[in-house]
Amino acid sequence: MQRRAFLAGLAALPFLAAPLSAQVNAAPIEAYLRSLRSARGRFRQRNANGSVQTGTFHLLKPGRIRFEYDQPEGAMVIADGTMVGVFDPKSNRNPTRYPLSRTPLHLLLRNELSLREPGLVLGATEDGNGIHITVTDPRRPEEGRMRMTFSRDPVALREWVVTPANGRSTAVSILEMQTGVEVARTLFNIELEAQRYRW
Protein backbone atom coordinates (compact mmCIF):
# COMPACT_ATOMS: atom_id res chain seq x y z
CA MET A 1 0.00 0.00 0.00
CA GLN A 2 1.28 3.44 -0.90
CA ARG A 3 2.29 5.44 2.15
CA ARG A 4 0.55 8.80 2.43
CA ALA A 5 1.83 10.01 5.75
CA PHE A 6 3.93 13.17 5.64
CA LEU A 7 6.47 14.08 8.26
CA ALA A 8 4.84 15.71 11.23
CA GLY A 9 5.69 19.31 11.78
CA LEU A 10 7.33 19.87 8.40
CA ALA A 11 7.45 23.57 7.73
CA ALA A 12 5.89 24.76 4.50
CA LEU A 13 8.41 25.32 1.74
CA PRO A 14 8.46 28.39 -0.41
CA PHE A 15 7.06 27.96 -3.90
CA LEU A 16 9.58 26.97 -6.51
CA ALA A 17 9.81 29.11 -9.58
CA ALA A 18 8.36 27.14 -12.47
CA PRO A 19 9.77 28.13 -15.86
CA LEU A 20 6.83 26.95 -17.96
CA SER A 21 3.76 26.98 -15.75
CA ALA A 22 2.26 28.21 -12.51
CA GLN A 23 4.34 27.91 -9.37
CA VAL A 24 4.57 24.46 -7.77
CA ASN A 25 4.23 23.86 -4.03
CA ALA A 26 7.17 21.61 -3.17
CA ALA A 27 6.26 20.90 0.47
CA PRO A 28 4.29 17.67 -0.16
CA ILE A 29 7.00 16.42 -2.53
CA GLU A 30 9.79 16.91 0.00
CA ALA A 31 7.73 15.29 2.74
CA TYR A 32 6.99 12.29 0.53
CA LEU A 33 10.65 11.82 -0.39
CA ARG A 34 11.66 11.95 3.27
CA SER A 35 9.05 9.35 4.17
CA LEU A 36 10.17 7.01 1.37
CA ARG A 37 12.58 4.70 3.20
CA SER A 38 12.16 1.35 1.43
CA ALA A 39 10.23 0.05 -1.56
CA ARG A 40 9.90 -2.69 -4.13
CA GLY A 41 7.95 -2.99 -7.34
CA ARG A 42 7.97 -3.23 -11.11
CA PHE A 43 9.46 -0.77 -13.59
CA ARG A 44 9.75 -0.02 -17.29
CA GLN A 45 12.97 1.52 -18.57
CA ARG A 46 13.30 3.52 -21.79
CA ASN A 47 16.92 3.65 -22.89
CA ALA A 48 18.68 6.35 -24.90
CA ASN A 49 18.84 4.04 -27.94
CA GLY A 50 15.05 3.63 -27.96
CA SER A 51 14.95 0.14 -26.48
CA VAL A 52 12.59 -0.72 -23.62
CA GLN A 53 13.21 -3.08 -20.73
CA THR A 54 11.09 -4.16 -17.78
CA GLY A 55 11.92 -5.69 -14.45
CA THR A 56 11.75 -5.59 -10.67
CA PHE A 57 13.37 -3.07 -8.32
CA HIS A 58 14.19 -2.91 -4.63
CA LEU A 59 15.05 0.33 -2.80
CA LEU A 60 16.55 0.86 0.64
CA LYS A 61 17.78 4.23 1.82
CA PRO A 62 20.37 5.49 2.10
CA GLY A 63 21.97 4.84 -1.25
CA ARG A 64 20.71 1.39 -2.18
CA ILE A 65 18.71 0.29 -5.20
CA ARG A 66 18.62 -2.90 -7.25
CA PHE A 67 17.18 -3.32 -10.74
CA GLU A 68 16.63 -6.88 -11.96
CA TYR A 69 15.77 -6.99 -15.67
CA ASP A 70 13.39 -9.51 -17.18
CA GLN A 71 15.55 -9.71 -20.31
CA PRO A 72 18.29 -10.56 -20.74
CA GLU A 73 18.00 -12.94 -17.79
CA GLY A 74 20.55 -12.12 -15.13
CA ALA A 75 21.02 -8.48 -16.10
CA MET A 76 21.14 -6.23 -13.04
CA VAL A 77 22.18 -2.82 -11.80
CA ILE A 78 22.96 -2.57 -8.09
CA ALA A 79 23.84 0.48 -6.01
CA ASP A 80 25.27 -0.48 -2.61
CA GLY A 81 25.39 2.97 -1.05
CA THR A 82 28.79 3.87 -2.44
CA MET A 83 29.25 2.15 -5.78
CA VAL A 84 27.08 1.06 -8.71
CA GLY A 85 27.63 -2.35 -10.27
CA VAL A 86 26.33 -3.11 -13.77
CA PHE A 87 25.92 -6.84 -14.46
CA ASP A 88 25.87 -8.12 -18.04
CA PRO A 89 25.12 -11.88 -18.19
CA LYS A 90 26.50 -12.05 -21.74
CA SER A 91 29.96 -11.11 -20.49
CA ASN A 92 32.34 -13.28 -18.50
CA ARG A 93 33.98 -10.23 -16.93
CA ASN A 94 33.36 -8.77 -13.52
CA PRO A 95 30.54 -6.22 -13.29
CA THR A 96 31.39 -2.68 -14.30
CA ARG A 97 31.65 -0.47 -11.22
CA TYR A 98 31.55 3.29 -10.81
CA PRO A 99 30.83 5.71 -7.93
CA LEU A 100 27.17 6.26 -7.11
CA SER A 101 27.96 9.95 -6.70
CA ARG A 102 28.72 10.11 -10.44
CA THR A 103 25.01 9.72 -11.26
CA PRO A 104 22.16 12.07 -10.29
CA LEU A 105 20.25 8.99 -9.07
CA HIS A 106 22.08 9.29 -5.76
CA LEU A 107 19.95 12.35 -4.99
CA LEU A 108 16.80 10.20 -4.94
CA LEU A 109 18.53 7.72 -2.63
CA ARG A 110 19.56 10.28 -0.01
CA ASN A 111 18.25 9.89 3.52
CA GLU A 112 17.37 13.56 3.53
CA LEU A 113 16.65 15.52 0.35
CA SER A 114 15.87 19.16 0.99
CA LEU A 115 14.50 20.94 -2.06
CA ARG A 116 15.57 24.17 -0.37
CA GLU A 117 19.25 23.30 -0.82
CA PRO A 118 20.82 26.08 -2.89
CA GLY A 119 21.46 25.03 -6.46
CA LEU A 120 19.62 21.69 -6.16
CA VAL A 121 16.38 22.48 -8.02
CA LEU A 122 16.77 23.52 -11.65
CA GLY A 123 13.04 23.85 -12.31
CA ALA A 124 9.57 22.70 -11.36
CA THR A 125 6.46 22.42 -13.52
CA GLU A 126 2.99 20.97 -13.23
CA ASP A 127 0.80 19.64 -16.05
CA GLY A 128 -1.77 16.95 -16.77
CA ASN A 129 0.80 14.22 -16.21
CA GLY A 130 1.74 15.37 -12.71
CA ILE A 131 4.38 17.44 -10.97
CA HIS A 132 7.88 17.49 -12.47
CA ILE A 133 10.94 18.58 -10.49
CA THR A 134 14.38 18.66 -12.07
CA VAL A 135 17.37 18.46 -9.73
CA THR A 136 21.15 18.34 -9.93
CA ASP A 137 23.88 17.88 -7.37
CA PRO A 138 25.07 21.43 -6.62
CA ARG A 139 28.53 20.04 -5.85
CA ARG A 140 28.75 18.14 -9.15
CA PRO A 141 26.44 19.82 -11.68
CA GLU A 142 28.64 18.52 -14.49
CA GLU A 143 27.50 14.96 -13.69
CA GLY A 144 24.02 15.65 -15.08
CA ARG A 145 20.47 16.06 -13.83
CA MET A 146 17.39 14.07 -12.87
CA ARG A 147 13.74 14.91 -13.51
CA MET A 148 11.31 13.30 -11.09
CA THR A 149 7.58 13.07 -11.84
CA PHE A 150 5.01 12.72 -9.07
CA SER A 151 1.28 12.10 -9.01
CA ARG A 152 -0.74 14.65 -7.02
CA ASP A 153 -3.28 12.86 -4.82
CA PRO A 154 -1.79 10.97 -3.23
CA VAL A 155 1.70 12.28 -3.89
CA ALA A 156 3.77 9.38 -5.23
CA LEU A 157 6.86 8.97 -7.38
CA ARG A 158 5.87 7.82 -10.87
CA GLU A 159 8.97 8.30 -13.01
CA TRP A 160 12.52 9.60 -13.05
CA VAL A 161 14.64 10.54 -16.02
CA VAL A 162 18.40 10.61 -15.51
CA THR A 163 20.42 12.66 -17.98
CA PRO A 164 24.15 12.18 -17.36
CA ALA A 165 26.98 14.33 -18.66
CA ASN A 166 26.83 12.67 -22.09
CA GLY A 167 23.21 13.79 -22.54
CA ARG A 168 21.87 10.26 -23.17
CA SER A 169 18.75 10.07 -21.00
CA THR A 170 17.33 6.96 -19.36
CA ALA A 171 13.72 7.05 -18.14
CA VAL A 172 12.41 4.70 -15.46
CA SER A 173 8.63 4.51 -15.05
CA ILE A 174 7.20 2.83 -11.97
CA LEU A 175 4.49 0.34 -12.90
CA GLU A 176 3.73 -0.67 -9.32
CA MET A 177 5.34 0.02 -5.97
CA GLN A 178 4.97 -0.98 -2.33
CA THR A 179 6.64 1.26 0.22
CA GLY A 180 7.60 0.73 3.84
CA VAL A 181 8.45 -2.92 3.17
CA GLU A 182 11.19 -5.15 4.57
CA VAL A 183 14.11 -5.26 2.14
CA ALA A 184 17.14 -7.47 2.81
CA ARG A 185 20.44 -5.58 2.75
CA THR A 186 22.10 -8.57 1.07
CA LEU A 187 20.25 -7.66 -2.14
CA PHE A 188 22.63 -4.72 -2.53
CA ASN A 189 25.91 -6.61 -2.08
CA ILE A 190 27.73 -6.14 -5.39
CA GLU A 191 30.61 -8.46 -4.51
CA LEU A 192 28.25 -11.26 -3.48
CA GLU A 193 26.43 -11.05 -6.80
CA ALA A 194 29.72 -10.79 -8.68
CA GLN A 195 30.69 -14.27 -7.48
CA ARG A 196 27.92 -15.68 -9.67
CA TYR A 197 29.39 -14.11 -12.78
CA ARG A 198 32.92 -15.49 -12.38
CA TRP A 199 33.76 -18.61 -14.34
Image: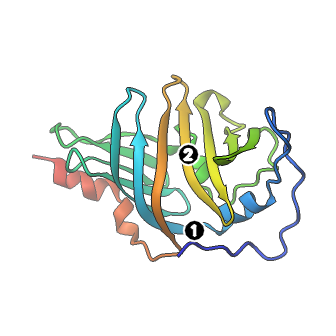
| Image-based side of 138 in relation to 193, left or right | right
- Which of the numbered marks, if any, corresponds to residue 160? 2
Q: Residue at x 81, y 37 (%)?
A: 21
The amino acid type, in three-letter code, at marker 1 is Arg
In this view, the residue in front, 54 or 137, is: 54
Disc 2 to disc 1, C-alpha distance = 17 Å
| Residue 139 placement (x, y as % from top left) | 70, 36
| Image-based side of 142 in relation to 193, left or right | right
Q: Nearer the viewer, mark 2 or mark 1?
A: 2
Q: Secondary structure at mark 2?
A: strand
The amino acid type, in three-letter code, at marker 2 is Trp
Q: Residue at x 9, y 46 (%)?
A: 199
Residue extending furthest front? 128
| Residue 133 placement (x, y as % from top left) | 70, 44
- Which of the numbered marks, if any, corresponds to residue 37? 1
| Residue 38 placement (x, y as % from top left) | 52, 68
Residue extending furthest top? 166
